[in-house]
Image (tube, coloured by chain):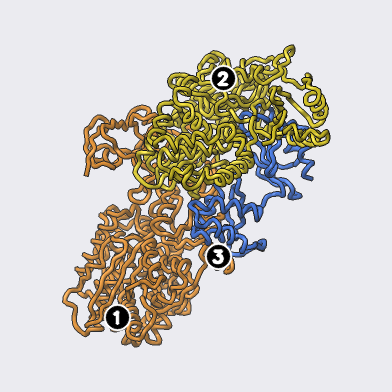
Chain colours: A yellow, B blue, C orange
Amino acid sequence: MHFYRAHVLVCAGTNCSLRGSRAVRERLAGELARRGLDGEIKVVETGCFGLCEQGPTVVVYPEGVLYCRVTPDDVPELVEEHLLKGRRLERLLYRETAAKAVQTVPQMDFFQGQVRVVLRRCGVIDPDSVEEYIAHGGYQALGKALTQMKPAEVVEEIKASGLRGRGGAGFPTGLKWEFASKAKGDVKYIVCNADEGEPGTFKDRLILEGDPHAILEGMAIAGYAVGARKGYVYIRGEYGLSIQRLERAILQARELGLLGEDIFGSGFGFDVEVRVGAGAYVCGEETALFESLEGGRGEPRLKPPYPTEVGLFGKPTVINNVETLANVPPIIQNGPKWFRQFGTERCPGTKVFTLTGDIVNEGLIEVPMGITLREVIFGIGGGIPGGRGFKMAQTGGTSGGCLPVQLLDVPMDYDELAKVGAALGSGALLVMDDTHCIVDIARVFARFFEHESCGKCVPCREGTMRIHEIVCRIATGEATPKDLDNLEALARTMALACLCPLGQAAPVPVMTTLKYFRDEYEAHIYEKRCPTGTCRTLAGRPALTAAGKGV
Amino acid sequence: MLIPMGGERMTDKAKPVLDLGRIDEIVSRHKGREGALLPVLREVQDFVGYLPREALERVALGLGLSLSKVYGVATFYTLFYTEPKGRHVIRVCESAPCHVQGAREVVEALQKELGVSFGETTPDGRFTLELVSCLGVCGVAPAIMVDDRVYGNLTPETVVAVLQEYR
Amino acid sequence: MATVKLTIDGIPVEVEAGTTILKAAEKAGVHIPTLCYLEGIHEVGACRVCVVDTGAKALQAACVTPVAEGMKVLTNTPAVRKARRMTVELILSNHPTECTTCVRNLNCELQTLAESLNIRSSRFAGERPEWPVDDSSHSIVRDPSKCILCRRCVSVCEKVQGVKAIGPLNRGFQTVIGPAFGDDMASSVCVNCGQCVLVCPVGALYEKDGIQKVWAALADPSKHVVVQTAPATRVALGETQGMEPGSIVTGKMVAGLRRLGFDAVMDTDFTADLTIMEEGHELIERLTKGGVLPMITSCSPGWIKFIEHFYPDLLPNLSTCKSPQQMFGALAKTFYAEKKGIDPADIFSVSIMPCTAKKFECERPEMRDSGYKDVDVVLTTRELGRMFKEAGIVLDSLPDDDYDPPMGLSTGAAVIFGATGGVMEAALRTAYEVVTGEPLADVNFKTVRGLEGVKEASVNLKGTEVRVAVAHGLSNARKVLDRVRAGDAPWHFIEIMCCPGGCIGGGGQPIPTDTEVRQKRIAGIYTADERLAIRKSHENPAIQAIYKEFLGKPLGHKSHELLHTKYTPRGRYAIHYRDKKVAD
């Protein structure tokens, strides 16, 4: 075994890649070779580390020093200073505040506040290396389940842990597995829902890119628990790198006998196939996903019957989100009590959040459930850039509720947020400062649903269009007070009458912005005024100015 | 994705020549699997560039499906095209996180530079501009995709520069 | 069977497990309005009109949600009412408002629903996609801007008829129903059966109008306008004026047609008897001289286009006989013209049919054996109903009248053509007596009657066992044909009717046409059969006369010229073979 004196980890998650991390890595490799250091120092390409705003990021171990916004031109100096002379390269260190330059990862507030369970390997291991996965504890849980536990015991462990679905619905995972394990039939399926289409959410992409084997392990454990021998991962078509990494991981796992027949000599066999979506947000809804996987239009089915009874190809199916499955191996490995030390009584464990919008530390974090919105935005999140005022935070993606400043102290878990009419959902967090117009962003929300409605049921197909039209009219100053009444009535009906969760959730952002920011809507309607000066006429000319004069 | 009404009339127009053997090979490779239609359409589109009528008929024939079903599936999804596209497809994210980070100005710059609106192709056939939903790279909003490549942290200036790579 | 107890609006009711809330409510005497629901054909819970409160977070569609023990269903809370009204308003916001000029005015499920919910305004004015009307087909017109996307037509075309000519295209608000690639109907594999028209709740699908042409011909003094009426129209026409389905209005229909101004009112049933003569002899010839077997009937033009598209390899199995409509057409401008001394160029030949595919059939290029277009215009039963209304003709007040010779006399065997199994039974009545030389003890062959999808029977013809099959609805036809193709068919003779129930369930019949209505019309058909003096085609004196005077003998030279036809193989995906290499 080769021993390296240092590891240089370069984040190659999509976000850092887009900022040029590949070039950094290549320059590093080249520079180390040039200096004859490549035998002692290893460069590792890892998955997303989470600090997307500061990318490309490079972490040097064993010290754990984090360098930010590294460019290829910085590399020779980095190698010279840190790797040869052992000195920190000050100017590239992460600066939490103007004064304090933070040196190592453990010292950073950004990482202090986090509890990285699902993300523990992201940014640490090379996702293309199954050996690194195993060395980091991978496949231990599967081994334990298959050789030391009965299927029913596995189900009990997940139930006892209190793990709830991390895709958005928050349904107790153990209960879902129990239903499926009790369902009659020889053929059952495990489906991983990686159709992550909720705007503002990119955690599943980065988990799959950074730690693909975790999903395979989670699915195999699920298969064992419920009696399924085949799994499908349905990944959205836009996630090219995730698809690649996962397919490679599957081949690696098969080669090592970690997928396929008789895993660990237990007699249990399980295999996974990747299926690719083709651009439809609605396919993130479980029954629409089944329709798509079965080769049809992604139009949701009626429930009941539920997937655990009648799911993919009509068979009992467990369908879980990527993050949910990534939680399974650690729970099996460490036990439910360990998992319950994080989070709250009814929502134990951690949650991966994606921070987007007007927030300093845009990126990926993992924190215990129950943390408040204020702590996320102003603590780990680093606050609002430019010192501007906080206006609104939308949790759970475009289908989530919009929360005003008075609700900043709501704990972030499924139940607490539901109480205030919002949703934890996928864990997406969109922060908006006071330079943005609520009506303008409501228009963007409405446009999204109109574009993504599948068209099967009347209230959603027609309703999303009408909501979009009304909000556009409000934005351009052409709406009447009646429009506001109609908008509310329509929103209320859609939430009750639509066939699937897409339609039921579509009016939520409109309803919450109306509830908490009604004055902005009214300014557009009664005064033809856009308080932030954002809204324009359809012709593109500013029609509604902050001062209230039309043009 | 939108179909023009009045597609087939009694007279045929000249159609591009298609390698049917290749399509048959794609179909036969997927045929045994359940739910083969989507993977087949994806591969056929990768190969042909879009999904013309002849290709869909061949797929329908090979998989034993009606043309209505195959076409109905092809037109449901944003990543499938039944009309030829420009050489490069530019997909602009229209969702809230990108919007909050200034996507509107990026969109305007793109439209001005290309001279087309959403769903249209530039006269020289080089670019097709599409407005799509969240691409899942919100960490680098505002973002676009050109074919398979993602570009993030765009400004009205940098997005025009991106286009240069493809000219 | 296990039962479930629940309450509907507080009313306790007990039903079998698996029953839907809708049915349970019916039992409790509570009516829940529906729109897209069509029992047995389309149960998808998509329109959301029938939503009810079951205590769940969201409202559930009553038509598809099964009951549960102890469920408390509320069908009329303020929230439910608001949701239902909102859904209808949303449909109306995307629907033309010109009801008064719509073909379904006063017979439209959307009108009925809006009225019953007391809708007085539609709050949501907005974009409405402008899809052009497709009237390319001879038989069926599509008006997608009136479509409410209930998708019943898709279900019927896909599942009941197995044709799959239309489907949903695009997504969301841009969804539209139609043939692939936005083809027009005329270019598609639509077989013109019109089952979609029967199930459409609104005016998005209807038959191509022939009424104006008929009025023009009737008003033209130089034209001798002849009309023939199909078997199935006489038990359904009454429904256009409020009578019970199955009411036999033959005599009144004839009287009404005369009032409209037709110069001669004759009967398709006559040529139905003729078809039996020709086809019966054709079968006997194939049986005895080793022709292609099994032989399949050919009187249903929707079925003919179907086999041309999907089973062109089996075209040799079809009988070469034309349909009764077309036999009549050819004879009207030859035999009849001669007999009456009328120049065939002046004859305008109209038929009243339960069928939309007949409009396509009369336009087929080969249907000109008389030297002219054999049948000029086909009107559906519905269209005739409209003409009577327009002319103020009240069926009830008309005295019964008789058909005109020489093509007006028919038998019970002819009238049963209207029901599934009827052609088979009529053929057997004649074939038995011709082959055995003995009179039939019982003319009724009940084994081939009824609504079962595929019926089988065997008849002993003097030691020879003749095995037969009867299928109605094209999905059932596929079952039979797949076996023929596989060489696994034990039958000698097969009757296939395109429409469920046979012609009485045809695409041109009054709307609604559901299972109950079909059964009533079928009962009317067999009652009409029993009432007729002559029940076997070969005993029809008018038939004997036309052979003696004009045709010679069955399958003779004149018959081949006028009464037999050829078929056209068609592409699997479009009206022509587009490119043999591609799809075939």
- The verdict on a common chain for dots 1 and 3 is yes
A490 relative to C551 in the view: left or right: right
Mark identifier at residue C543:
1
Camera-side mark, 3 or 2: 3
Please name the residue shown 33% across and 70% down the image: C495
Assess whether mark 2 and mark 3 are in contact (beta carbons under 8 angstroms): no
Label 2 and label 1: CA atoms lie apart by 83 Å
Residue C129 against residue C243 in the figure, above or below: above
Name the foreground residue: C525 vs A14.
Answer: A14
Q: Indicate the chain on which mark 2 is placed.
A: A
Q: Amino acid at mark 3?
A: Ala
Q: Quadrant of the C terminus of chain A?
A: top right
Q: Residue A28: where, in percent of width, then height?
A: 77, 33
Q: Of callouts 1 and 3, which one flags the residue occurring earlier in the amino acid sequence? A: 1
Callouts 3 and 2 in the same chain: no
- Estimate the x, y position of residue A399 in percent, counting from the top left: 52, 29
Please tell me the numbered disc located at residue C583: 3
| Residue occupied by mark 2 | A522
In the image, residue C227 sits, relative to residue C166, either above or below, namely below
Crowd band around label 2 with a 10 angstrom C-alpha radius: few (<14), some (14–19), many (20+): many
Residue B142 seen in the current view: no
Q: Position of residue A397 (x, y in %)?
A: 55, 29
Q: CA distance from mark 1 to mark 3?
A: 46 Å
Identify the residue at image location x=73%, y=50%. Answer: B125
Residue drawn at the location 39% of the way across and 33% of the way down: A153
